[in-house]
């Protein structure tokens, strides 16, 4: 009988995610705990259909059921030992021991070992073997071993470990079918009972005669791992490609310059590459709105469909290309091995703010979304550093801010190029990202000097070998990011759009006959519940340059930042519908330049995301940290916007 659930286990950067993507394809869903870098996933592995055995006679009541065709798979966060030092590792150990509150102990395990660094993986295996879970071993990067002139003996390894061993070349898909076949044939076996005489030393029944039995056991595990690694593989000590690239990327001068160039390309790509696709989506929704207006009779229903649904959701979905580019670049940097180098390069700079380089990974992940960024802070062993990283993660410029930035920048910053290469709009966007990032680091400095003062743990981070990413893995990542974004647009943003439309449509104003259509709609909006709410709260935000329409957008976006664009699309839909002008053109006529800068600065700081607050509570185990984060970011947002608006207004006059 095949196992019902399988877990992928291995050290960080061992290639687990590549194997997981190859085995599960599109049949994945995000789990509720973090993974190697950002998150872990569960998925379904589809196996070949197996025939059902026929009964030997018509009266025979024993029938063999068809073998199951799907197996659930969990991609566990990477770990280095069964003595967890981070919350990330603790989750994996709890699941493997059957102690997790949500996930049961897996029926079987695919233990993934990094072929070019076997000793590290074998040390983990030496501890893992005591759990006696049925296992097969997948050794990745076999092609890298051969390319460097090394050799690997999978038969000898299978004999030493007592389980089936499969060689894998993940980015080429080599060996994946062997794993799938092993799952279908149930080739899993518990690790050999003796495990070269080591199992008794790593079990819970350690001899108590020695003064430090645990330390003695760890030394024996390391010695066993070194011995097995030398017996089954001959690998050159130095990877020529890694040495060559690191000589440039980690150079005291060229390294930081390359890092700055990568970051500059990162922000330029968001504008330059995404513009054609954004314009196409914008035109598509505009045409859809025109078509609905033509086909449906004028009235409340038409207004609901065109202005409540299409104007609300469409104004956000058009930013999908930029969010995908953001996700693509971060995923590429991680997969090729550069992300860890970036952490190394910024370690000294981050040390000036009380953080270590390991915090760079969660903070850069927060550029896509603060939620996986906070979850990946579990890789930080120091509790004070972890809490500091979580509290400043919302200041990192996440993709939810991107629609607001792009809308306001394209409306108020001219699209011109410096030296024919650098787009001014891209430079402004980079400046906003830098403002959020530097502000977050300054906040970290304050926190580490006050509430979370204490000594830092040494910064230790493995630099993985450079490798080519798998295009299938990249496409799967983009697919799931698209699905996540569209699901958000189809649920939260749609519901908020409908709610805002209802507040703007009721109560219906008394409009005299003969009033021009555009003026009638403006009167309706001003006298609606939405208009009354905005005007009632307008005095609070008036010092920032926000009129009642912008105030409504700010209030609506407290649930999710990107809703601001949807609200603006609805509030100004009367103008757009009549004049056929795009939203940014309308904003140019109705919002001053100082107010536009004030809006941008406000959204650099404000924590306006209910999901982020909920996850922060879960990660910290208390409501006091989300409450503090929301309060201090709101104070920063209001104060900074106030100063910027007042200064710009004086200079603009």
Image: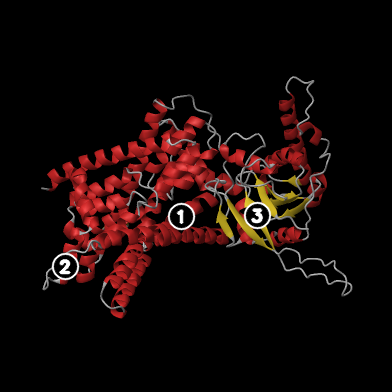
Secondary element at tag 3:
strand
Q: How many marks?
A: 3
- For the N terminus, give its image quadrant: bottom right
In front of the other: label 3 or label 2? Answer: 2
Q: Residue at image x 76%, y 68%?
A: 50
The residue that label 1 is drawn on is 327
Is residue 275 toward the left or the right of residue 463 in the image? left
Return the disc, 2 or 1, that comes first in the chain's sequence. Answer: 1
Q: Residue at image x 81%, y 47%?
A: 162
Return the disc, 3 or 1, that comes first in the chain's sequence. Answer: 3
In front of the other: label 3 or label 1? Answer: 3
In front of the other: label 2 or label 1? Answer: 2
The CA span between labels 3 and 1 is 24 Å
The residue that label 2 is drawn on is 520
Task: Relative to 6, say whether 205 is above or below.
Answer: above
Q: Residue at image x 53%, y 61%?
A: 475
Q: Quadrant of residue 81?
A: top right
The CA span between labels 2 and 1 is 43 Å
Secondary element at tag 1:
helix
> Looking at the picture, how far across and down is residue 232, in whole percent?
77, 46
**Disc 3 and disc 2 in contact, CB within 8 angstroms:** no
The residue that label 3 is drawn on is 73
Secondary element at tag 2:
helix
> Looking at the picture, how far across and down is residue 635, in whole percent?
29, 37
Q: Residues within 10 Å of mark 3 (few under 14, many from 20)?
A: many
> Looking at the picture, how far across and down is residue 119, in whole percent?
70, 40
Q: Residue at image x 85%, y 68%?
A: 61
> Looking at the picture, how far across and down is residue 293, in whole percent?
29, 76
Residue 341 seen anywhere in this rendered image of the structure? no
């Amino acid at each position: 009988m095949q196992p019902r659930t399988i877990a992928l286990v291995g050290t960080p950067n061992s290639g687990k995610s590549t194997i997981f993507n190859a085995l599960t394809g599109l049949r994945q869903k995000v789990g509720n705990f973090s993974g190697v870098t950002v998150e872990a996933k569960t998925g379904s592995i589809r196996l070949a259909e197996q025939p059902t055995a026929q009964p030997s006679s018509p009266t025979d009541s024993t029938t063999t059921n068809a073998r199951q065709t799907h197996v659930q798979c969990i991609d566990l966060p990477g770990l280095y030992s069964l003595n967890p030092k981070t919350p990330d590792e603790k989750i994996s150990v709890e699941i493997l021991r059957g102690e997790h509150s949500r996930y049961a102990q897996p029926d079987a395990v695919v233990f993934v070992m990094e072929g070019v660094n076997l000793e590290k993986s074998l040390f983990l295996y030496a501890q893992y073997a005591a759990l006696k879970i049925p296992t097969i071993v997948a050794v990745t990067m076999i092609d890298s071993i051969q390319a460097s002139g090394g050799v690997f003996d999978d038969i000898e390894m299978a004999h030493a470990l007592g389980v089936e061993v499969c060689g894998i070349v993940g980015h080429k898909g080599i060996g994946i079918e062997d794993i799938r076949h092993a799952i279908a044939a149930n080739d899993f076996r518990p690790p050999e009972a003796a495990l070269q005489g080591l199992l008794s030393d790593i079990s819970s029944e350690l001899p108590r005669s020695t003064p430090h039995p645990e330390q003695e056991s760890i030394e024996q595990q390391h010695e066993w791992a070194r011995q097995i690694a030398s017996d089954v593989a001959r690998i050159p000590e130095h990877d020529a490609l890694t040495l060559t690239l690191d000589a440039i990327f980690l150079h005291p001068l060229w390294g930081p310059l390359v890092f700055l160039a990568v970051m500059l390309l990162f922000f330029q790509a968001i504008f330059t590459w995404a513009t054609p696709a954004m314009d196409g989506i914008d035109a598509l929704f505009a045409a859809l709105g025109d078509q609905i207006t033509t086909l449906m009779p004028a009235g409340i229903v038409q207004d609901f469909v065109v202005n409540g649904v299409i104007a609300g959701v469409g104004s956000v979905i058009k930013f999908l290309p930029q969010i995908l580019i953001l996700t693509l670049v971060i995923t590429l940097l991680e997969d090729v091995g550069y992300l860890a180098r970036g952490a190394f390069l910024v370690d000294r700079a981050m040390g000036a703010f009380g953080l270590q380089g390991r915090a760079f990974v969660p903070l850069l992940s927060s550029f896509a979304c603060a939620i996986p960024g906070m979850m990946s802070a579990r890789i930080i062993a120091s509790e004070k550093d972890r809490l500091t990283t979580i509290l400043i993660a919302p200041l990192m410029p996440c993709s939810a801010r991107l629609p607001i930035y792009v809308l306001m920048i394209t409306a108020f910053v001219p699209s011109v190029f410096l030296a024919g290469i650098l787009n001014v709009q891209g430079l402004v966007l980079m400046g906003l990202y830098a403002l959020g990032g530097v502000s977050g680091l300054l906040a970290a400095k304050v926190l580490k000097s006050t509430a979370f003062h204490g000594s830092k743990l040494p910064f230790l981070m493995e630099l993985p070998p450079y490798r080519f990413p798998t295009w299938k893995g990249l496409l799967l990542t983009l697919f799931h990011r698209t699905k996540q974004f569209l699901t958000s647009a189809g649920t939260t943003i749609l519901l908020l759009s409908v709610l805002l439309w209802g507040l703007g449509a009721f109560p219906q104003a008394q409009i005299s006959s003969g009033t021009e259509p555009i003026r009638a709609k403006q009167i309706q909006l001003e006298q609606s519940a939405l208009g009354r709410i905005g005007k009632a709260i307008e005095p609070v935000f008036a010092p920032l340059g926000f009129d009642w329409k912008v105030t409504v957008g700010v209030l609506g976006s407290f649930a999710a930042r990107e809703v601001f664009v949807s609200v603006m699309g609805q509030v100004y839909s009367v103008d757009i519908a009549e004049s056929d002008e795009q939203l940014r053109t309308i904003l140019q006529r109705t919002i001053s330049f100082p107010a536009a800068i004030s809006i941008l600065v406000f959204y650099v700081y404000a924590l306006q995301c209910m999901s982020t607050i909920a996850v922060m509570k879960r990660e910290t185990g208390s409501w006091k940290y989300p409450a503090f984060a929301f309060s201090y970011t709101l104070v920063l947002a209001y104060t900074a916007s106030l100063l910027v608006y007042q200064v710009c207004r004086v200079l603009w006059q």
